Image: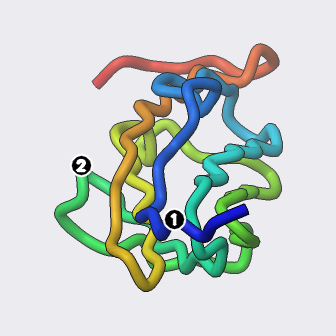
C-alpha cells in the first residue's frame, strides 16, 4: 500500500446545519480525514472572521466541539471548523440555529 499525502477533507456526513435549544448540551462532530492523519483543528465564529475563544462551557477534541449547558440565542450563526495537516488545510461551515428553551418565554427584539 502506498502513502498518498492528502490535505484534510470533511466527509459528507459532517453537518451543514445544527438546531439546538438554549441550555442543552450541543455536540458537533466535524472530524476530517487526511493523510497524514495528524490533524489540528481551529474553530471560528461568524463565517471565519474571528477565531472562537473556547470558554468554560466548551471543549474541542479531534474535531468534536462540545458546548456543555448549550449556546445562547445570541451565539447562533455560522461556525467554521478549520482542519490542517502537513499537506494543507480546509474549512467547513455549520449554521447553528439556537431556539428558545421550551420552558422559557422568548421575546423578539
Locate residue 100, reporting x and y percent: 62, 22
Q: Which residue is depicted at the point 76% across and 14% down?
A: 102
Q: Which residue is depicted at the point 61% across and 54% down?
A: 33
Colouring chosen for the image of the structure: rainbow
Locate residue 6, reporting x and y percent: 45, 63
| Left or right: residue 77 compared with residue 97 | left
What secondary structure is found at the residue carrying circle 2? Answer: loop
Q: In which quarter of the image is the N terminus?
A: bottom right
Locate residue 67, reporting x and y percent: 72, 56
Q: Quadrant of the C terminus?
A: top left
Residue 38 quadrant:
bottom right
Around disc 2, counting alpha carbons within 10 Å, would you say few (fewer than 14), some (14 to 19), or many (20 or more)? some
What secondary structure is found at the residue carrying circle 1? Answer: loop
| Vertical relation: 61 (above or below) 102 | below
Locate residue 37, reporting x and y percent: 65, 72
Q: Which residue is depicted at the point 70% across and 45% down?
A: 29
Q: Which residue is depicted at the point 59% across and 53% down?
A: 32
- The earlier-in-sequence mark between 1 and 2 is 1
| Vertical relation: 65 (above or below) 35 | above
Q: Nearer the viewer, residue 3 or 64?
A: 3
| Left or right: residue 79 compared with residue 18 | left
Name the residue beneath numbered marker 1: 4
The reply to whether the C-beta atoms of the residues labelled 1 and 2 are less than 8 Å apart is no
Q: Residue furthest left?
A: 49
| Vertical relation: 58 (above or below) 66 | below
Q: Distance between the residues labelled 1 and 2?
A: 31 Å
Q: Nearer the viewer, residue 44 or 103?
A: 44
Q: Nearer the viewer, residue 51 or 97?
A: 51
Mark linked to residue 47? 2
Amino acid at each position: 500500500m502506498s502513502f498518498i499525502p492528502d490535505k484534510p477533507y470533511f466527509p459528507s456526513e459532517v453537518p451543514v446545519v445544527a438546531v439546538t435549544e438554549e441550555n442543552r448540551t450541543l455536540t458537533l462532530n466535524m472530524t476530517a480525514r487526511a493523510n497524514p492523519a495528524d490533524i489540528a483543528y481551529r474553530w471560528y465564529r461568524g463565517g471565519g472572521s474571528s477565531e472562537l475563544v473556547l470558554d468554560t462551557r466548551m471543549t474541542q477534541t479531534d474535531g468534536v466541539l462540545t458546548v456543555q449547558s448549550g449556546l445562547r440565542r445570541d451565539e447562533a450563526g455560522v461556525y467554521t471548523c478549520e482542519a490542517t495537516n502537513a499537506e494543507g488545510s480546509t474549512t467547513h461551515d455549520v449554521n447553528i440555529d439556537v431556539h428558545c428553551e421550551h420552558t422559557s418565554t422568548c421575546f423578539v427584539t
